[in-house]
Structure formats: structure tokens, C-alpha cells
Amino acid sequence: MTGRTAVRLDDTDRHILAGLIDDGRVSIKALADKLHISRANAYTRINRLMAEEVITGFSTQLNPQRAGLGTSAYVTLTIDQNAWRDTSRKLREIPYVEHVTLVAGDFDVLVLVRTPDNSVLRQVVLERIQAVPGVRSTRTWLVFDEVRGGGTHWTA
């Protein structure tokens, strides 16, 4: 996060975002036709949304179990004061670390780790995460089951 202010979005921008969130593989032509705008308008708006960092990328959502990552855990970290930038950079370099978040509360950082099995999870937490400079302590929460929420819904 950069701390920048929100970008002003109109109804067409919100409909474009909703269409892309619903199906990131939708063609620009199909999206433009659905929204009753020209392809050129759709391209221009999507490029502007990317330039203004409203859209920060496109990705594929995996089923972790089917992809061979059957063990998931949230790892909470307590880190040295003012160590966030260096610590987050190092954490992102560790294989199997999916998400790193700075939070407020009883701990400082929340890390989502997805590994093939408990042995690899143990290695990631005890040998890789705990070795990152600035990490003072960790606590691991094994995930037994998870469901996807409704996500962001854009309404015009």
C-alpha cells in the first residue's frame, strides 16, 4: 500500500471492475459489448485503471489442494520495531509464502503459507521465516478447511 488517496471511479469504471473480477479472462470486446461501450473506450479505461493502480495485475486462482499444496497455515510474527520494510521483502522471497500483511494487534505480521505437507511447513516456519532478520517470534495456526468469501462487489 502506498497510502495514496482513492481514485474517482464512475459507474462505467465500476462495471468494468465487476466484469473483470467476475471473469478475468473476458475479452475486451465481450466486456465492451456487455457494457454497451466501444472497445476503444474499454481499452482506454482499463489502461487508465492500471496506470492509476486501481488494477494492479491479473492472476489465476488456484485450488491449493489440487495444485499439490495441501497444507496451509497462518503464521503470526512479532518483529522488531521499524523492521517492516526489510522483513516483508525477505518474507516475500521465501518459497511457499503466499501473502504477507502488516497488522495491528497482538502481533505485527500475518503470513499465509501453503506447502505440500507438514514437513515442508515446518522447514518454512522454523528454518526460513524464523531466520529472517527482525523476526522476534512466530506462532503457527494450521488451516483445517477454508471457503472463499463473496469478494468485492462493485455496484453502480
Image (spheres, rainbow, N blue to C red):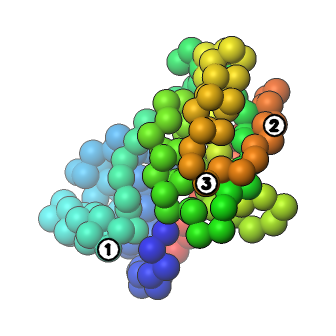
126 w.r.t. 9: above or below: above
Nearer the observer: mark 2 or 3; the answer is 3
The residue that appears at 55% across and 39% down in the rendered structure is 98
Look at label 2 and name its amino acid. Trp
Look at label 1 and name its amino acid. Glu
Look at label 3 and name its amino acid. Gly
Q: Position of residue 105 (x, y in %)?
A: 81, 66
Residue 30 is labelled as none
Q: Earlier in the sequence, mark 2 or mark 1?
A: 1
Q: Residues within 10 Å of mark 1 (few under 14, many from 20)?
A: few
Say which element carries label 1. loop
**Outermost residue to the left:** 40
Q: Where, by quadrant of the figure, is residue 8 drawn?
A: bottom left
Tally of numbered discs: 3
Relative side of 8 to 81, left or right: left
Q: Is residue 63 visible?
A: yes
Q: Position of residue 92 (x, y in %)?
A: 48, 44
Residue 71 or residue 37, whichever sits in front: 71
- List the residue tagged with mark 1: 52
30 w.r.t. 62: above or below: below
The residue that appears at 20% across and 62% down in the rendered structure is 43
- List the residue tagged with mark 3: 134
- List the residue tagged with mark 2: 141
Say which element carries label 2. strand
